[in-house]
Amino acid sequence: MAVEAGKWAAEWDRAKKAFEKNTKEKKPSETFLKISLGSGIGSKLKTMDTAFDNYVKAKGKTETERVATKAKYLKELDKATKDAKKSVDAYIKILNKAWADELKKTGSKMKLDSINVLEKDLDAIIESAEARVKFDAGLLGKKGDELKAAARDLGALIKNLDATLKKGALFAAQCQRNTNGDVAEAIAFFQDNIQDAARDINQNVGNIAKQYDATSAEAKEGTSLFKEISPWASNAKSQSEIKNMKTMKDVIANTKTYTDWVKKVAGWRKGLKVA
């Protein structure tokens, strides 16, 4: 379920292959979703990957030159992400229509939930790239205390939270899709991925809560949300409700627990005030 920076095209390829496997249909194709895969999303994500790779590897004869080079490639990543987002937004509209058409035609839960996963995957890809651009732009050229302060920038931290919430929504959608398939596979997927799914969001919740006065509503609620999922975020497989999963009902129950928590975090995030 990982959406890794610089591996956005590979993530989309993985999502399409999973779609084929789970629905027994060709990846979103002319026959199923009424459009051609020549929508250009894959190539645009590769452009993002290239810009990010260049950014990470950027060097210079002097520190000033290095920072300038990195800034150039980060700007290219920003441009490529905005370009990809236009295609993704258009494609998501098509996915939504495909979902509605499929519901009218057969109501197949596997197909419906698999389309939902594709949409969530694209959402998470774009949000993660946007968050990376914002966060890294604030760090460029900074050193010492200035760097530490930039790393704690509330706006950037909240953008990171938005990205991990998208990944959380993707994980929940994947688990929902899996409940229409093999029990052993559904259990293994949940057990193998829940810790990362919980930790990614929880780290951001904890970091953001610390930026507010300890007596504030933002800090109190954030700290409560952080503690609520901490066992799953730090040592998930040792938790009895996860370790002892045996039936699809267990997958459904644990997915609901996780999804409800993600929704509470999303509600908390909407109320955050940025000075």
Image (cartoon, grey):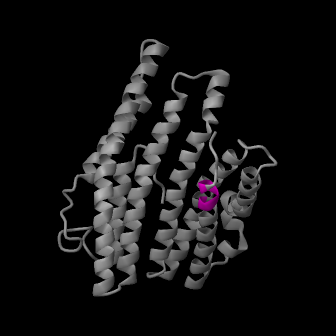
Which region is colored magenta? 266-270
Residue 228 placed where, x, y %? 73, 63
147 left or right of 171? right
Image location of residue 263, percent across then percent down:
59, 65
Residue appearing at x 44%, y 44% in the figure: 130
In the image as oriented, which residue stretches furthest toward the bottom? 106
Q: Residue at x 62, y 26 (%)?
A: 147
Quarter of the image holding residue 71? top left
Toward the top, the furthest residue is: 62
Count up the numbered dots. 0
104 to the left or right of 134? left
Residue 197 visible to the viewer = yes
Nearer to me, 139 or 101: 101
Q: Is residue 247 visible?
A: no
Image x and y of residue 95, in percent: 31, 68
**Residue 130 placement, left or right of 235:** left
Residue 149 or residue 234, whichever sits in front: 149
**Quadrant of res 222:** bottom right
Q: Nearer the viewer, residue 182 or 156?
A: 156
Whether the magenta-drawn stretch holds residue 146 is answered as no
- Above or below 22: residue 15: above
Residue drawn 37% across the image and 30% down it: 73
Q: What secondary structure prevails in the magenta region?
A: helix
Residue positioned 41% across, 29% down in the render: 57
Magenta-span inclusion, residue 269: yes
